[in-house]
Image: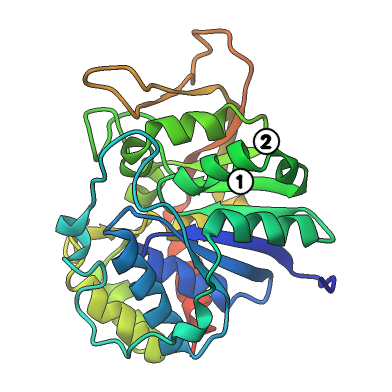
Amino acid sequence: MEKTNKRPIIIDTDPGIDDAMALAAALFSKELDVQLLTTVAGNVSLEKVTRNLLRLLTFWDLKIPVTKGASQPLLRAARDASEVHGESGLAGFDFPDGNQENLLPESAVAAMRRVLIAATEPVTIVALAPLTNLALLLREYPEAKEKIAEIVMMGGALGRGNFGAYTEFNIGVDPEAARIVFDSGLKLTMVPLEMGSIAKIYPEESQKMASLNQTGRMLYSLLQHYRSGSLDSGLEMYDSTVIAYLLNPSMFTVEKLSVQIETQGAYTAGATIVDLAGFYQEPANCQVCVNLDSTKFSTWLLAALANCP
């Protein structure tokens, strides 16, 4: 592949309203080279998230390869978040039919391996969804690890969860996959649930968004149907914080910590045990975002969306 000054990335996603916001910021960034988009069951079913991604790309008139990944977790029954994102996953806007030419016949894991092996420089994997595809990649194609620069993920929680008492959705849907990723020895950056709770969109920002461009109007329409918070009290923008970290990490406070994934607990399966105080004396295996400048985030997000059509 031709070398560019852009950072090469693969985005693994499950659109999802907040995924749409993150994708808009990433796909129109002058600093990121999105080489592949992969889908995984998460916010809604695999078929729906893939359809949603193809519709978004058609809306933006973009030609980026898409591949379908895992339709269910490694060991557990599939669960979704349609109560947050609507039955379709992108409730609130009438999208055009997706261009099927963007969809490749190969599996997400095979496509990831192909892109990684062919890469002339290490590739960053951006995970906005349950980690099933990444676990399968690491398990089936360990030779691809040396081409992964870093995995930056939206997932986990420093404290309380949104899927269980201590469990965040993306990790909780497939804890076994998350454990494989966190035990991989790769460079990991975790942008946890709490960052999305800081990175809120309020009515003033949403009105500015609607006035930016066609993308801003589309996202504004989606936000009217997003059920993670409310427009009055602030809508939590989880996935966009990952793109913010990639493009402007200085707005975050980051600590190198030990993070372990609970898979056995009757009430805590999928919990991320973030050892902030060093209780367990385990070596650090993850960079963890522990704080975020909300004003800088809002300014960055509106500027990023202004780059969209």
Residue 277 screen position, x and y as percent: 49, 15
Q: Is residue 247 visible?
A: no
Question: Is 144 on the left or on the right of 269, as rendered?
Answer: right
262 vs 27: above or below: above
**Split into 4 quadrants, where in the image is the N terminus?**
bottom right
Q: Which residue is mark 2?
A: 186
Q: Which mark is residue 254?
A: none
Mark sitting earlier along the chain (2/1): 1
Q: How is the image coloured?
A: rainbow
Considering depth in this image, is 75 or 273 the residue closer to the camera?
75
Circles 2 and 1, Cβ within 8 Å, touching? The answer is yes
Q: Residue at x 35, y 33 (%)?
A: 75
Near mark 2 (Cα within 10 A), the count class, few <14, some 14-19 or many ≥20, is some
Distance of label 2 from label 1 (alpha carbons)? 7 Å
Q: Residue at x 46, y 87 (%)?
A: 60
Near mark 1 (Cα within 10 A), the count class, few <14, some 14-19 or many ≥20, is many
Disc 2 secondary structure class: loop
Question: Is 285 on the left or on the right of 265, as rendered?
Answer: right
Considering depth in this image, is 153 or 89 the residue closer to the camera?
89
Residue furthest to the front in view is: 105
The amino acid type, in three-letter code, at marker 1 is Ile
Q: Is residue 101 visible?
A: yes
The amino acid type, in three-letter code, at marker 2 is Leu
Residue furthest to the top in view is: 280
260 vs 1: above or below: above
Q: Residue at x 42, y 52 (%)?
A: 70
Q: Which mark is residue 151?
A: 1
Residue 62 screen position, x and y as percent: 54, 86
292 vs 97: above or below: above
Residue 298 screen position, x and y as percent: 43, 65
Q: How many marks?
A: 2
Q: Quadrant of residue 138?
A: top right
